[in-house]
Image: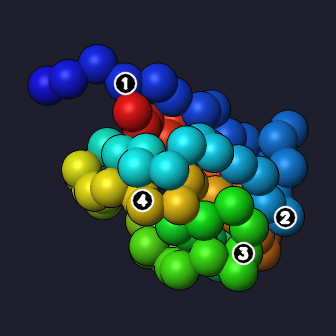
Amino acid sequence: MANGAYLHVNSLTTGTGAVVSPNPGAVLMRVVINTVGATSNQLTLYDGQSTSGKVIAVVNTTNSAIPALEYSLVAANGIWYTLLAGTAADLTIVYQ
């Protein structure tokens, strides 16, 4: 497994959208759900610098049966996230 950088996301970080990596060609390695969210909380990952980018994934963060999601994909325009609706999950987004 290659080393990577990470971004910790939870109820104290912005849910409406923030950059994970601004670098073209960033590699989204995995998303770790440290603590599940509640009340329909969902993480959306984008290939881009805002919510106008192409959607990579929409993750139901309330599912405790899936502690981590592996991606290993190249985001041509960088990586952006939103964590909306309900009580926020505690997540670690790993990227290169």
- Secondary-structure class at tag 2: loop
The figure's colour scheme reads: rainbow
Task: State the image coordinates of residue 52 (x, y, percent, origin top left).
Answer: 70, 80
Give the mark nearer the N terminus: 1 vs 3.
1
Q: Quadrant of residue 53?
A: bottom right
Structural distance between the alpha carbons of marks 4 and 2: 20 Å
Q: Amino acid at mark 1?
A: Gly
Q: Residue at x 37, y 24 (%)?
A: 4
Give the mark nearer the N terminus: 4 vs 1.
1
In the picture, measured across the screen, residue 83 lies left or right of residue 47, that is right
The residue identified by callout 3 is: 51
Give the mark nearer the N terminus: 3 vs 2.
2
Q: Nearer the viewer, mark 3 or mark 2?
A: 3
Q: Nearer the viewer, mark 4 or mark 2?
A: 4
- Secondary-structure class at tag 1: loop
In the picture, measured across the screen, residue 88 lies left or right of residue 23, that is right
For the residues bearing labels 2 and 1, Cβ distance under 8 angstroms? no
The residue identified by callout 1 is: 4
Question: How dense is the environment of label 3, judged by Cα within 10 Å: few (below 14), some, or many (20 and up)?
Answer: some
The residue identified by callout 4 is: 75
Structural distance between the alpha carbons of marks 1 and 3: 24 Å
35 over 76 or under it: above or below = above
In the picture, measured across the screen, residue 51 lies left or right of residue 23, that is right
Q: Amino acid at mark 2?
A: Thr
Structural distance between the alpha carbons of marks 3 and 4: 14 Å
Task: State the image coordinates of residue 1 (x, y, percent, origin top left).
Answer: 14, 25
